Amino acid sequence: MTFSRTPAIPTRGRAAEAAHWRRGAALLAACLPLWAGAHGTATEPVPDEVGLRAGVAAAVTYLRADAVLPSARLDGFVLQGDEGVDRRRWGLEHGVLDVGWRFHPQWAAYAAVGKHDSDRPHTEAFWLQARQPQGDATWLLSAGRQRPALGAVLETAGHFDRFSQVPLAQRATLNGSWIDDGVQLGWRGEVAGRPVALDAGLWRGQVFPGARQGSAVPALHVGTQVGDVAIDAVAARFAPRGRGTRTSSFGAGHSHAAPICDASTRGQVACFDGHSDLAAASARWQSPDWPLTVSAAGWLRRDRGDVASGNGSARYHSTQRGGWLEGVWQFHPQLEAGLRVERLQARHALSGPGAALLASELRLNRYRPAQRTVWMLGYTPRPGLDVRLELGRESVAGQRVRYAMLRALWQFDTQLAP
């Protein structure tokens, strides 16, 4: 078997509407002291010289949409199956407190705590790094919780990015972002006169598309610069055992962890055993003559294995691919406009006695290519503070949503003496 409307927003009274605006005003007021001290963003999480830097960053949004956004389950694609968070009205898109400390020319440490909307705070980074120069090149060895090297375009997508939402392709591949525990060896130098970045990592792999059980995840990143174009490529292999996808809405609130496959979830979760191969590539062109930046990126995920639930089992093969193209024009030192166009598609194949039922449980029978188009206008009244307006249109599983978002982003960053 191969598979190539959310309700409208209920009418709210004036009292409820006023309460939402008061909540938003309170969030913005709480940030005014930070805005007063904001003076730009750090280019590196730790100082290049011995010293200490500390920072706080946050994005507050007000979203109006004619249906739930983001499309919670991303029907037609296999993820964790939770219902996600409805980001309409005021909310904290993302907040981070971080500290970077270079306590020796060759040694550095970094820690970051993040928070999304009403989620509990979580550790985004906690790593130790050794740096060893070798001629004109540098070796880097980091261990701990961190974001595997993906390249600038993929690492920042949906993470204090110019556009608020995580691209559909990255969400379908990684459930949003990849933060993992592991070890990564990097090399920075030149090859044939071109700058080159190489990173090889070994990761725990308990985050999606991995599971609590499974082997370690090898990953490789290569980046270079060709003229005015920065190019990056990434590959990784996950081998999950018992990766869960919710098939029942019971207890399916938003979660950063995949549901567990055991007797207690029988009938509510479909479990996958097999391999998930990931590949990605990105390119960013900065015009030498115009204030124009063009970026393109794509993700590919291939699942091969067996899927089973309390109602049957089947052999499962899936290939999903997607990407985005965006352009940003800075027509004034404080003003810029941008456009991002996205598309995500997949091919799912199930064979076996439980194929039809599993396809229905996983909502694969609702599959349609997903698309999103977003226009953005940004204003930077001072370094470290951005105010942005987005107008977008999204289509997932044949359900179309239009939305408008007002977004404020800021960062306070300070360098302390050694």
Image: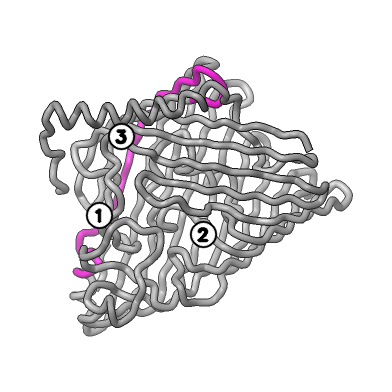
Q: Amino acid at mark 3?
A: Trp
Q: Amino acid at mark 1?
A: Arg
Q: Amino acid at mark 2?
A: Ala
Magenta span contains residue 38: no
Give the residue displayed 55% in from the left and 69% down from the top: 204
Give the residue displayed 25% in from the left and 54% down from the top: 368
Q: In which quarter of the view is residue 255 placed? A: bottom left
Of callouts 3 and 1, which one flags the residue occurring earlier in the amino acid sequence? 3
Q: Are marks 2 and 3 in contact (CB under 8 Å)?
A: no
Spatial distance from mark 2 to mark 1, Cα to Cα?
Answer: 22 Å
Give whichever of 48, 112 is nearer the camera: 112
10 Å neighbourhood of mark 2: few (<14), some, or many (≥20)?
some
Q: Is residue 146 above or below residue 378?
A: below
Q: Can you name the residue that lies furthest to the bottom here?
A: 353
Considering the image in quadrants, where does the C terminus appear? top right
Q: In which quarter of the view is residue 364 placed? A: bottom left
Q: Which residues are magenta?
A: 360-385
Q: Which residue position holds label 3?
A: 90
Q: Can you name the residue that lies furthest to the right here?
A: 135
Which percent across, then down, holds residue 60? 39, 33
Q: Is residue 242 above or below residue 12?
A: below
Marks 3 and 1: which is nearer the front?
3
Of callouts 2 and 1, which one flags the residue occurring earlier in the amino acid sequence? 2
Q: Is residue 210 left or right of residue 255?
A: right
Give whichever of 147, 299 is nearer the camera: 147
Q: Which residue position holds label 1?
A: 368
10 Å neighbourhood of mark 1: few (<14), some, or many (≥20)?
many
Give the residue displayed 57% in from the left and 54% down from the top: 147
Q: What element does badge 1 sit on?
A: loop
Q: Is residue 394 left or right of residue 332?
A: left
